[in-house]
Amino acid sequence: MVETFPQGKNKSKLQGFTKLNITKTLTPKNENGSLDQRFISYVQSLIEHCGQECIDTLHQFHKETEESERKAGGAALHMIVKLYSLKMEDWEKKRLAKSLREALQEIGFKPSKVTKLMGAGKFKADQWNRLHHCIGYKSDQQLKEEQHDFLNKYGVAALYEISRMNDVGQAKVRNAYVDNGNIMSKHALEEIRQEIPAIVDERRGRRQSSIQGSTKPLSQEADTSINLNAYESLKSAEDNSEPLQLSAQKSVSEFLYSVEPDYLDKLLNQYTPHAQDQILSMLSEAVTKLASYLATRQFVNI
């Protein structure tokens, strides 16, 4: 069976881009996601000053970009599946996947959409030829056709949710379709994923001996890390006597260092590709929340 493009829905998210809808879109959000009521009147005034023609143009642009992303999503997923199906070294595949991620964003896909595409594509490629044997006899060809049919029935968002479940959750979704022809809703998939998620922090190269308590000496790199942590603890103790504003500046500087691209690359390299996609998704959500928080704060001019 041939891997097919997932079929999206023809319905646009914004049907009737009303004044209320754009007000919600433009109004700054509180940390809990609710609208900051202080800005609603300003946003309404902004909309009135812009005029209906301006709003209609933005509405049309949103509809067209949403529709274009929906139509191109199947092709993007297909390319990602083929990428992860290529025979190459792990580091080569990882580097090419990173380049593809950047390319998809450059041609217009939202970062959150790219994260779902990459996760769904890798999962589909990994699972495409995996056979799930059952109690009753079925030939390998039958099992392969069942697996292909199951994977082709779900779209990007659903495959991404399934990829974030552990084996038990994935088996539950697969059996529901193979045994009864049931295609689960996104809400049902989210509930299963929340109940039995995959282990996000599973690191590459982790050995069973480390869980049971290995007596192997620590590497030089590990020793360096421990010494660095001890040094940071000493510095933190010294900071107690520093003025509050200097300690605050130090904390922000350390935070900024932790999100430097080189540092993040080293961090991601410790995890599996699947876990990397989930981490990047969480970082993307964190960026949105941080931007929303900063928008609610007033800067003090000195």
Image: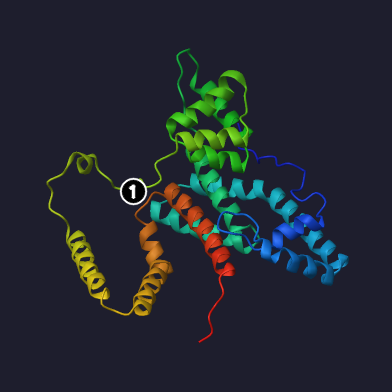
Tell me residue 64's x, y (percent): 77, 56
Q: Is residue 147 above or below residue 293?
A: above
Q: Is residue 60 above or below residue 163?
A: below
Of 281 and 54, nearer the camera is 54
Position of 58 with respect to 156 (left or right) is right
Give the SS element for disc 1: loop
Position of 204 with respect to 183 (left or right) is left
Classify mark 1: residues with Cα within 10 Å, few (<14), some (14-19) or many (20+): some
Tell me residue 196's x, y (percent): 45, 34
Q: How many labels does the image show?
A: 1
Residue 127 in sight from this viewpoint: no
Position of 15 with respect to 245 (left or right) is right
Which residue lies under the disc numbered 1? 203
Quadrant for residue 294, please give it: bottom right
Residue 239 in sight from this viewpoint: yes
Colour treatment of the image: rainbow
Q: Is residue 135 above or below residue 101?
A: above
Of 110 and 191, nearer the camera is 191
Tell me the residue at 50%/26% (across/down).
Answer: 172
Tell me residue 19's x, y (percent): 81, 58
Kind of residue at disc 1 = Arg
Tell me residue 288's x, y (percent): 56, 61
